[in-house]
Amino acid sequence: MFAALGDDTRLRLVSRLSGEGPLSISKLTAGFPITRQAVTKHLRVMERAGLVRGTIRGRESVWQLDQTRLADVRQHLQMISARWDETLGRLKALVER
C-alpha cells in the first residue's frame, strides 16, 4: 500500500482522483507529461494495492479511489505519527535533563 503511494506520479493521480472524483484515463492524463499507457501502469499498481478501482463505461475506463482503503492508510499514518510524537517527546525530555 505504502509502496504504491511512494511514487510522485501515483500521489498526483490520487490527488486528482480525490479532488475531482472518478475520472477517465483521458481526463487523468490531461496535464501529465506521460502517456496514457504509463498512467494506466501506475493505476494498475495502485489497483493491486487496493487504492483505486477501474470500471468500464462505454469505451472508457473510469478510475476512482477506494475510500475504505484510503481510510486504512490514514489510520496507519496517524498511528505512526503518534508514535513519532511520543518518541520525540522522550528524546526532548532526555536532552533537557
Image: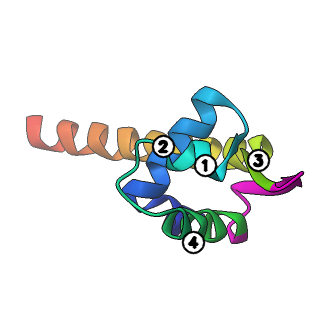
Badge 4 local density, few (<14 within 10 Å), some, or many (20+)?
few
The first of marks 1 and 4 along the sequence is 1
> Which residue: 40% across, 61% down?
34
Left or right: where 43 falls relative to 66: left
Closer to the eye: label 3 or 2: 2
- Classify 44 as above or below 85: below
Q: Which residues are magenta?
A: 48-59
Q: Specify the amino acid type for callout 1.
A: Ser
Tell me how far mark 3 sits from mark 1, CA to CA. Answer: 20 Å
Which residue sits at x=87%, y=56%? Answer: 56
The CA distance from mark 2 to mark 1 is: 6 Å
Verify CB contact (< 8 Å) between mark 2 and mark 1: yes
Q: Quadrant of the C terminus?
A: top left
Task: Quickly name the residue at label 2.
Answer: 30
Which colour assignment does the render follow?
rainbow
Residue 59, percent across and down? 83, 56
Q: Which residue is mark 3?
A: 66
